[in-house]
Image: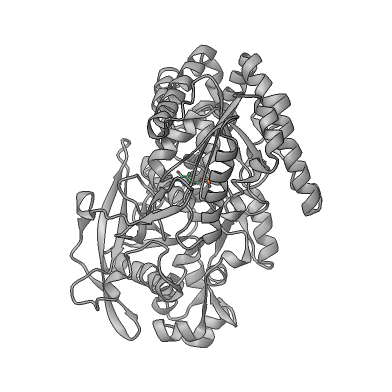
C-alpha cells in the first residue's frame, strides 16, 4: 500500500494512514526489561527498544516472539574465570496474560498447539504495543513439543528449526486467529522467515503479494552466521508446507538458508548501519539493500542523574530526543555532577561485589558485550608491558562484563583469558569482570564509566548499540571504526577511533598494527592527559556525545525511518 493523500494532495497524518492495519514485528528474542529474560544480547535489546519507541510514537505495531520460559541463562563465574551456566526460571503470569486462543502447526507430522501470552507495552503518550509471547507448553501437546519454546538459542538444529516454525508460521497464524489485520510483516533477522511460506500459502503462491508485505532486517555480516537447514531435515520436521521446488527456489538449492528466504520474499531489505549495508551487498549480490542505522530507546538507557538534568534543561527530550542537540545550554558543572553520580553508583557496586577498592576519581574504562571471538575483549591485553606503562600505577581502572553463549567454548575461554590478565596485572591496574551481564547491569555499568571501549574485528560488528547507550550518558566512545561508529565518529570531537577507516585498504596485519598503535597511543597521549589535565575539554566531548550522537542514534529516529522508508 502506498502513501494516502487527501483531495488537496496533503499527506494525512501517519496514524490515520494506517489506523486499521498493523505492522507485525517478528523477533526471536525481545529484551524489554530484566524481569522478562527473553533475550541474549544486542538483537533482543534492539527489538525491545523498537517496540518501546513504537509505543511512544503511537505506531500501529504488534510484536511476535517466543516465550523462552526458561530464559537464556544466568552467568556465574568462578575465581578462575570459568563460566557456569545457571538456569533461569521466570513466571510469565506475573507480567502477562495467557490468551485462550490456540493455533496449530505441523511438526514431525504432529499437530503442535500454540498459545500466546499477551503483554502490552504502554507508553506515557498513550500509545500501546502488544507483544505475543508464543508458548507450546500447552495441554495435549507431546511432552517433547511442550519444550519447544523453553530455551532461547538452546538445543540443536532440529530444536532451532522447530522454534522457527513456531515463530514464523505459528506467529502468523496466531495474529490471524486473534483478529489482527496485518499490513506488513517485519522480520527482525532471518529466524522468522518461515512466515513467508505461510503467506505464500495464504495468497495462493502469489509471490508479488507476499513480497509487498514483507520487510527484512538483516543483522549478520558473515555467511556462517545465517541459519541453514538441510532439506532432509526440513522435510522431516516441517513436511511440505509449500512444494519443495518452490522452497528451493527461494531458500537456496543445497540447503534452506533462512536469510535467502527472507531476501527473496521481501520488498524492503535493510542492514543496520551504512557500513553494514555495504558489507551485506557484497555478501548477497543482486539484492537491493538499504540501510537504517540502529538506535536505542533514549529514556530506557539514560541514567537517573542525566534524566533529571535533561528534564530540567530540555523538557520533552524523552519523546523528542532531537532536543539533545541543545545540550550546550546545560552548564558544564552540572554535566560533570550528573556523570559523577552515575560513576559513584557503578564504583560502589563494583566495590560491593568484588571488594577491589576502585575509586571515583580514576579514569575508568568499560567494556561489556557478549563474550564471543569477534568482539575481541582481549585486544586491550595484546601488550601487557605497554598497558602497565600507560597505567603508571593507577591512572586507569577497567570494568568488564559479558556472557558467552553456553555452547561457545571459545567465548568461554576468552573470559578465562581475561581473568588471567586480571591476575597478572593485579598489582598495577584494577580490573574487574562482573558476572551476569544483562539489561540491569548494562544500565548501571555503561553510564558509570568515563570511556566506552569497543574493539570488534571488522567488519563483523553489524551495528553495535552499547556505544549509543554510553553517549546518552555523556560517556565518550573509543572504538574500532565498524558498525554505527563509522557514522557517529568525529575524531577528537565525539570520541576517538581505534585503527583505520574502512575506506583505507589495508592488510589484516597492517590493520591490527594500526589498531594496537591507536589503542595504546591514544590512551597514553590523548585520553589520559585530557581526563586529568583538561577537564573542560573532556566535558566538551561529553556534551558532543550527547548533542551529536545521542540526539541521532536513538530508536525514535530509527522508527521514523522505518515508517517512511519501509512501512508506508
Ligand atoms: C545493549 C546491550 C547489548 C548490545 O551491546 P553491543 O555493544 O551492541 O554488543 C548486549 N547486551 C546487553 C545486556 C545490552 O544491554
| Left or right side of 305 for 465 | right
Q: In this view, does 47 lie to the left or right of 37?
A: right
Taking 386 as reference, is 233 above or below it? below
- Residue 337 position within the rendered picture, expressed as x and y whole percent measured from the top left: 47, 16
Residue located at (64% from left, 66% from top) = 287
The answer to which of 197 and 259 lies nearer the viewer is 259
Give the tally of numbered discs: 0
Res 232 seen here:
yes
Task: Find residue 205 and report its horizontal and vertical position in percent.
Answer: 47, 80
Q: Nearer the viewer, residue 405 or 162?
A: 405
* 121 or 178: nearer the viewer: 121
Q: Is residue 551 visible to the viewer in this orientation of the structure?
A: no
Q: Residue at x 47, y 87 (%)?
A: 243
Query: In the figure, 51 relative to 469: above or below?
Result: below
State the scheme by which the image is colored: one colour
| Residue at 18% across, 73% down | 139
Q: Which image quarter: residue 137?
A: bottom left
In x, y percent, where is residue 117? Answer: 25, 59
Reply above or below: 90 against 440.
below
Q: Where is residue 64 in the image (x, y as percent from the top left)?
A: 36, 60
Amino acid at each position: 500500500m502506498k502513501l494516502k493523500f487527501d483531495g488537496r494532495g496533503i499527506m494525512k497524518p501517519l496514524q490515520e494512514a494506517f489506523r486499521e492495519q498493523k505492522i507485525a514485528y517478528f523477533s526471536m528474542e525481545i529484551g524489554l526489561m530484566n524481569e522478562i529474560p527473553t533475550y541474549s544480547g544486542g538483537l533482543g535489546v534492539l527489538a525491545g527498544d523498537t517496540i518501546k519507541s513504537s509505543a511512544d510514537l503511537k505506531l500501529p505495531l504488534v510484536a511476535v516472539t517466543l516465550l523462552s520460559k526458561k530464559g537464556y541463562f544466568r552467568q556465574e563465574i568462578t575465581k578462575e574465570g570459568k563460566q557456569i551456566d545457571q538456569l533461569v526460571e521466570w513466571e510469565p503470569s506475573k507480567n502477562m496474560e495467557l490468551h485462550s486462543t490456540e493455533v496449530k502447526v505441523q511438526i514431525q507430522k504432529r499437530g503442535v498447539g500454540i498459545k500466546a501470552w499477551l503483554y502490552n507495552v504502554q507508553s506515557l503518550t498513550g500509545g500501546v504495543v502488544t507483544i505475543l509471547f508464543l508458548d507450546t507448553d500447552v495441554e495435549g501437546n507431546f511432552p517433547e513439543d511442550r519444550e519447544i519454546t523453553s530455551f532461547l538459542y538452546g538445543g540443536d538444529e532440529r530444536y532451532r528449526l522447530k522454534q522457527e516454525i513456531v515463530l514464523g508460521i505459528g506467529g502468523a497464524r496466531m495474529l490471524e486467529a486473534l483478529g489482527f489485520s496485518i499490513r506488513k510483516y517485519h522480520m527482525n533477522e532471518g529466524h522468522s522467515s518461515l512466515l513467508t511460506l505461510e503467506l505464500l500459502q495464504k495468497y495462493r503462491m502469489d509471490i508479488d503479494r507476499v513480497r509487498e508485505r514483507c520487510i527484512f532486517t538483516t543483522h549478520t555480516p558473515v555467511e556462517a552466521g545465517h541459519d541453514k537447514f538441510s532439506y532432509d531435515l526440513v522435510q522431516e520436521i516441517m513436511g511440505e508446507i509449500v512444494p519443495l521446488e518452490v522452497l528451493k527456489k527461494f531458500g537456496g538449492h543445497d540447503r534452506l538458508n533462512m536469510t535467502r528466504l527472507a531476501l527473496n520474499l521481501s520488498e524492503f531489505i535493510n542492514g543496520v548501519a551504512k557500513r553494514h549495508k555495504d558489507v551485506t551487498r557484497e555478501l548477497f549480490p543482486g539484492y537491493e539493500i538499504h540501510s537504517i542505522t540502529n538506535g536505542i530507546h533514549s529514556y530506557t538507557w539514560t541514567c537517573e542523574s542525566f534524566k533529571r538534568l535533561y528534564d530540567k534543561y530540555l523538557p520533552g527530550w524523552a519523546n523528542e530526543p532531537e532536543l539533545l542537540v541543545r545540550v550546550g545550554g546545560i552548564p558544564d558543572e552540572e554535566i560533570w555532577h550528573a556523570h559523577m553520580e552515575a560513576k559513584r553508583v557503578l564504583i560502589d557496586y563494583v566495590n560491593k561485589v568484588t571488594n577491589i577498592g576502585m575509586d571515583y576519581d580514576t579514569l575508568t574504562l568499560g567494556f561489556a558485550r557478549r563474550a564471543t571471538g569477534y568482539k575481541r575483549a582481549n585486544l586491550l591485553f595484546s601488550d601487557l608491558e605497554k598497558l602497565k606503562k600507560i597505567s603508571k600505577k593507577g591512572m586507569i581502572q577497567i570494568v568488564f562484563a559479558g556472557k558467552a553463549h553456553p555452547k561457545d567454548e571459545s567465548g568461554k575461554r576468552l573470559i578465562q583469558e581475561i581473568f588471567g590478565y586480571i591476575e597478572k596485572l593485579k598489582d598495577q591496574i584494577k580490573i574487574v569482570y562482573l558476572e551476569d551481564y544483562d539489561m540491569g547491569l548494562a544500565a548501571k555499568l555503561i553510564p558509570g564509566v568515563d570511556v566506552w571501549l569497543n574493539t570488534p574485528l571488522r567488519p563483523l560488528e553489524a551495528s553495535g548499540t552499547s556505544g549509543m547507550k554510553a553517549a546518552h550518558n555523556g560517556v565518550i566512545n573509543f572504538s574500532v571504526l565498524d558498525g554505527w561508529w563509522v557514522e557517529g565518529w568525529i575524531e577528537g570531537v565525539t570520541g576517538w577511533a581505534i585503527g583505520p577507516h574502512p575506506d583505507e585498504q589495508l592488510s589484516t596485519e597492517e590493520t591490527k598494527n594500526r589498531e594496537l598503535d591507536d589503542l595504546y597511543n591514544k590512551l597514553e597521549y590523548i585520553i589520559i592527559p585530557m581526563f586529568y589535565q583538561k577537564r573542560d575539554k573532556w566535558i566538551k566531548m561529553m556534551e558532543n556525545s550527547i548533542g551529536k550522537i545521542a540526539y541521532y542514534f536513538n530508536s525514535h529516529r530509527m522508527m521514523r525511518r522505518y515508517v517512511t522508508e519501509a512501512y508506508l
